[in-house]
Amino acid sequence: MKLMITFSKKEGRKPIIAQAVKDTGVLINVERAFIDSSEGEALIDVPDDQCTLVRERMKALGASVRVLEHGITLDEDECVDCGACVSVCPREVFSMDAGGKLVVDEERCVICGKCIKACPHRALSLKFE
Ligand code: SF4
Ligand code: SF4
């Protein structure tokens, strides 16, 4: 299960992920991390059956934790099948069918966020629990 961890500048100085691994004994896979002078954000992957344990420990350490329900989500009402997302995705999640309609293979998504910025109609998003 994927969790989005957000921490403020204050907590950003603490090794929150390392501390959570130590405290819970759960091996955490960090898929993406961004830390600047004001805040930090990390996308982590944890085993489904240990998600609650890690989530609660992270929260106790001062982080905000959101559970990602699944990969990229398409709003079909907003999509105009322009294809702008196809070329930016590093995982070939998007393709066009014979009729020129966008097809999404969500299972391939690694949640890099590139397509969200590329879509001119804001038809792509990530859904949190
Ligand atoms: S978030 Fe990244 S991997 Fe997922 S569909 Fe968008 S561009 Fe592809
Ligand atoms: S970039 Fe947006 S509007 Fe264009 S095909 Fe992709 S999801 Fe649809």
Image (spheres, rainbow, N blue to C red):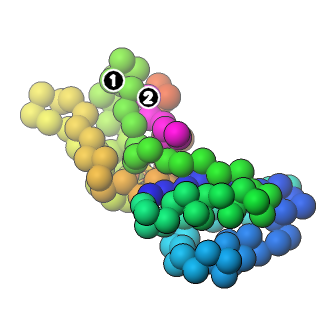
The residue sitting at 43% across, 63% down in the picture is 49
The residue sitting at 35% across, 49% down in the picture is 87
Compared to residue 58, the image places residue 101 above or below, namely above
For label 2, count other residues whose C-alpha is less than 10 Å away and answer few (under 14), some (14-19) or many (20+): some
Main secondary structure of the magenta stretch: loop
Find out whether residue 30 is within the magenta segment: no
Rendering coords of residue 93 (x, y %): 30, 50
Quadrant in which residue 55 is drawn? bottom right
Task: Say whether residue 13 is left or right of residue 97.
Answer: right
- Range covered by the magenta-colored residues: 123-129
* Residue 64 appears anywhere in the view: yes
Residue 1 or 108: which is nearer the viewer?
A: 1
| Pointer 2 residue | 123
Residues under numbered marks 1 and 2 in contact, where contact means CB atoms less than 8 Å apart: yes
Residue 12 or 85: which is nearer the viewer?
A: 12
Task: Say whether residue 59 is left or right of residue 37.
Answer: left
The answer as to whether callout 2 falls within 8 Å of ligand 2 is yes
Compared to residue 42, the image places residue 26 above or below, namely below
Element carrying mark 2: loop
Q: Looking at the picture, which amino acid does disc 2 mark?
A: Ala
Rendering coords of residue 61 (x, y %): 78, 63
For label 1, count other residues whose C-alpha is less than 10 Å away and answer few (under 14), some (14-19) or many (20+): few
The residue sitting at 85% across, 70% down in the picture is 13
Q: Earlier in the sequence, mark 1 or mark 2?
A: 1
Residue 25 or 123: which is nearer the viewer?
A: 25
> Which of the image's four quarters has the N terminus?
bottom left
Q: Looking at the picture, which amino acid does disc 1 mark?
A: Glu
| Pointer 1 residue | 76
Q: Between marks 1 and 2, how big is the CA–CA gap?
A: 7 Å
